[in-house]
Amino acid sequence: MMTVLAVSIGFAFFCVVMAMLLCTIRLLIGPTVHDRVLALDTLWMCAMLLAIMFGIRFGNLIYFEAAMLIALLGFVSTIALAKFMMRGEIIE
């Protein structure tokens, strides 16, 4: 018999994978660069959530460390893309 946690993780996994699929579609066919940057931002957040769910499901701490790394790199890349869109350069 499946536990409530296993069913919840399975449903959350399905929802995050669907969100990643929709973000990938928006990233590929987004009409403006702003839509594409927002889709990329949401995509790394979904990847971080996916790593956290794998960590909960398998009980391994390496997935939580990977989620932390994805969060840090995603935040820095979002700031860099926003600065590039505003000024046209990243490093002044």
Image (tube, helix red, strand yellow):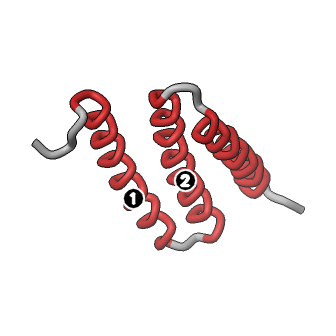
- For the N terminus, the image quarter is bottom right
Residue neighbourhood size for the residue with mark 1, other residues' Cα within 10 Å, grouped as few (<14), some (14–19), many (≥20): some
Identify residue for label 2: 47
- For the C terminus, the image quarter is top left
Q: Residue at x 33, y 40 (%)?
A: 81
Q: Earlier in the sequence, mark 1 or mark 2?
A: 2
18 vs 68: above or below: above
Q: Is 38 or 47 nearer to us in this picture?
A: 38
Q: Residue at x 45, y 36 (%)?
A: 37
Where is residue 91 shown, x and y percent of the image? Answer: 15, 46
Mark 2: amino acid: Ala
Q: Please tell me whether mark 1 sits on a helix, a strand or a loop.
A: helix
Q: Please tell me whether mark 2 sits on a helix, a strand or a loop.
A: helix
Where is residue 38 shown, x and y percent of the image? Answer: 48, 33
Q: Residue at x 72, y 43 (%)?
A: 18
Q: Nearer the viewer, mark 1 or mark 2?
A: 2
69 vs 14: above or below: below
Q: Is 22 or 6 nearer to us in this picture?
A: 22
Identify residue for label 1: 68
